[in-house]
Image (cartoon, rainbow, N blue to C red):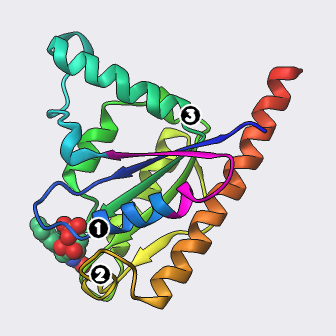
Amino acid sequence: MNSLHIAIVSGASRQGRQSHKVAQHLFSLLQQEEAIEVNLIDVSSADIPHYQDGDLRSLEVQEKHAAFSKQLKEADCIILVSPEYNGGMSGSLKNFLDHFRPEYDRTVFGLASVSSGSMGGLNAMQQMVAFVSYVGGFLSNSRLLVSDISRGFDESNAVIDARLEKNAKRFAEDVVWLGRAVKAKKLEEIKG
Ligand SMILES: Cc1cc2nc3c(=O)[nH]c(=O)nc-3n(C[C@H](O)[C@H](O)[C@H](O)COP(=O)(O)O)c2cc1C
């Protein structure tokens, strides 16, 4: 059986970020599944500078760009995890995403937003939904909105919020379900 490739993009770059714990939790959930290859792209260590047109990028950035492009192109599903900052998705995440475009076409997206308050980063979520729709991705049916993130994990970063645990599991299952369906359709088309 062909493995399903999933790339998780963790969108916070500040020290002390909490949303990265959600990205890590999704990573470990998916890693436990059979026939799934998952990798975690961390915008904080990706070190991709502010957007610049291709040929104006330094050689170093062009190399990094090519490596991330390959990862995103190979991904059957892309999961975006964003904190909510000032009523939207994080600027670091948007900057990272703007460096790519054809990589997103007909790719399944799962969206997770995180906030310290009670709204689960709904504004960030809405921006991500608009982004996916604009770039021609397929949106998974369930979205993960994580509120009160400070209550989500213990000191060893294990989930302690039962609702988060349940929602994250269902979210991951739904992304995988759609990812497999779309991948099967693409393989069918290739075989003719
Ligand atoms: C610059 C900044 C702006 C923020 N703006 C919002 C906001 O608009 N709405 C909200 O619910 N939380 C907001 N928060 C709180 C974050 O949701 C909170 O820090 C949460 O832990 C997710 O971000 P993190 O991954 O950086 O920790 C903001 C935090 C920062 C640092």
Q: CA distance from mark 1 to mark 3?
A: 26 Å
Q: Position of residue 116 (x, y in %)?
A: 24, 82
Q: Residue furthest left?
A: 15
Q: Amino acid at mark 2?
A: Ile
Q: Which residue is mark 3?
A: 105
Looking at the image, do the residues carrying marks 2 and 3 touch, with CB atoms under 8 Å apart? Answer: no
Q: Amino acid at mark 3?
A: Asp
| SS at badge 1 | helix
Is residue 127 left or right of 134 when viewed as pictured?
Answer: left
**Res 125 seen here:** no
Mark 1, Cα crowd under 10 Å, few <14 / some 14-19 / many 20+, is many
* Rendered residue at 68%/46% (across/down): 35
Q: Amino acid at mark 1?
A: Ser
Q: Which residue is mark 1?
A: 19
Q: Position of residue 63 (x, y in %)?
A: 27, 17
Q: CA distance from mark 2 to mark 3?
A: 32 Å
Q: Which residue is mark 2?
A: 149
Q: Position of residue 79 (x, y in %)?
A: 47, 53
Is residue 18 left or right of 128 when viewed as pictured?
Answer: left
Disc 2 within 8 angstroms of ligand 1 (CB): yes
Q: Is residue 165 above or below residue 42?
A: below
Mark 2, Cα crowd under 10 Å, few <14 / some 14-19 / many 20+, is many
Looking at the image, do the residues carrying marks 1 and 2 touch, with CB atoms under 8 Å apart? Answer: yes
Q: CA distance from mark 1 to mark 2?
A: 8 Å
Magenta extent: 29-41
